[in-house]
Amino acid sequence: MASDITITGSAAPELGTPIAAKRWQAPAADLARVQAGPVRAVLPDVSVLDIEGPDAVAFLQGQTTSDIAGLGPGSFAIGGYCSPKGRLLAIFRAWRTATGVRLLLPREIAEPTRKRLSMFVLRAKLHLTDVSASWQVLGICGPGSVQALAQAGVVAPEAPGRCSELAPGELVARLESGAACPERLLLVVAADAAPAWERRLEALAPVDAGVWWWSGIDAAVPDVFEATRECFVPQAVNLELLGGVNFRKGCYPGQEIVARSQYLGKLRRRMGIAHAPAIGPDGDIYHRDDEGSDAGGSDDAAVVGRIVMAAAAPGGGWDLLYECPTERTERGSLHAGGRDAPALALRPLPYPIFDPTA
């Protein structure tokens, strides 16, 4: 179950302007199940956009951070859609169809994304449609997920970022995984076939969708939601480390700023993963130095970043993705959602930090 703590703020808030903190709180029993074996969750809070037509690939190639033209059969790629200022409006998964490209992204930003993309279609030969009603998306995660799918007659791709067709339009995709949830897969199936799939997958315990979103946090894979649209440049949430930014392709909205962030000096802001016994109600990350005051000399904690997303964790407390300057992680303590929240226990990312342009 997802919940938002909504505090008045702008649509594209600057740091220090309170925002809604996106978080999920699945039942403890469901979180225990994903530790023990494979589970399945229906994901009603994601949408499918269909970009169909002879110009679909070229259009998206000129609008997004990823190499849509390089999507081959079996690709299930992560990518971003930016504002002219280089701030992320959406993070999506993309795959080719017989007639174009499909995008998977959070439902709450699907319509704003579709509308904004539609503004730039002009004379391009394509149609941009929300086809979510035709499909059901299932998240499969937990140890033994690949074997459980195999027993149900579904052969999962071997590597993250790959997908296989199950039937016309239906697919199974393998996603990145983390230390606590070693296997993560997605099924996109026809809505009218959902009851048959439920019977076919009955060996996988049904759980709340919050379990799936927690597994994404464990894998340190970010998403953008309505409250965090235009808050982050792609590198600040590690999108280029996940293969979601191609620095050799042509122009797209925000490309100059994204490239400048990459090539001119060290990237100061990064996304990290952490655990806390509790988090406060807002969406900010606060810093205290070793003496209990912030680096500016105040007795209060300084706002230094944002919560990207958070979810109740197995065993209690919260796991979260956060974004802040890297130097703030080297001394003092970070606190999520409130100045008086407990200090975060920082965890290593499940993937390396490297320069994809090197």
Image (tube, grey):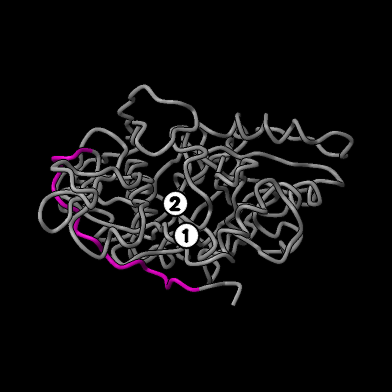
Q: Is residue 51 above or below residue 7?
A: below
Mark 1 vs mark 2: which is more N-terminal?
2
Mark 1, residues whose alpha carbon is within 10 Å: few (<14), some, or many (≥20)? many
In percent of the image, x 45 and y 44: which residue is there? 198
In percent of the image, x 70 and y 50: which residue is there? 168
Q: Is residue 7 above or below residue 334?
A: above
The mark lying in front, picked from 1 and 2, is 1
Q: Is residue 185 left or right of residue 271?
A: right
Front in this rendered view, residue 183 or 19 = 19
How far across and down, in percent of the image, does residue 221 sit? 44, 56
Report the number of numbered marks. 2
Instruction: Spot the residue most to the left.
Output: 291
In percent of the image, x 24 and y 39: which residue is there? 337
Q: Is residue 165 magenta?
A: no
In the image, which residues are magenta? 338-354
Q: In the figure, residue 358 lies in which quadrant?
A: bottom right
| Three-letter code, disc 2 | Pro
Instruction: Spot the residue most to the bottom.
Output: 358
Front in this rendered view, residue 178 or 195 = 178
The answer to whether residue 119 shows anywhere in this view is: yes
Residue beneath disc 1 = 238
Q: Which mark is residue 222?
A: 2
| Three-letter code, disc 1 | Asn
Q: Is residue 181 left or right of residue 341?
A: right
Q: Are marks 1 and 2 in contact (CB under 8 Å)?
A: yes
Q: Is residue 154 left or right of residue 323?
A: right
Q: In the figure, residue 348 lies in which quadrant?
A: bottom left
* Helix, strand or loop status at disc 2: loop
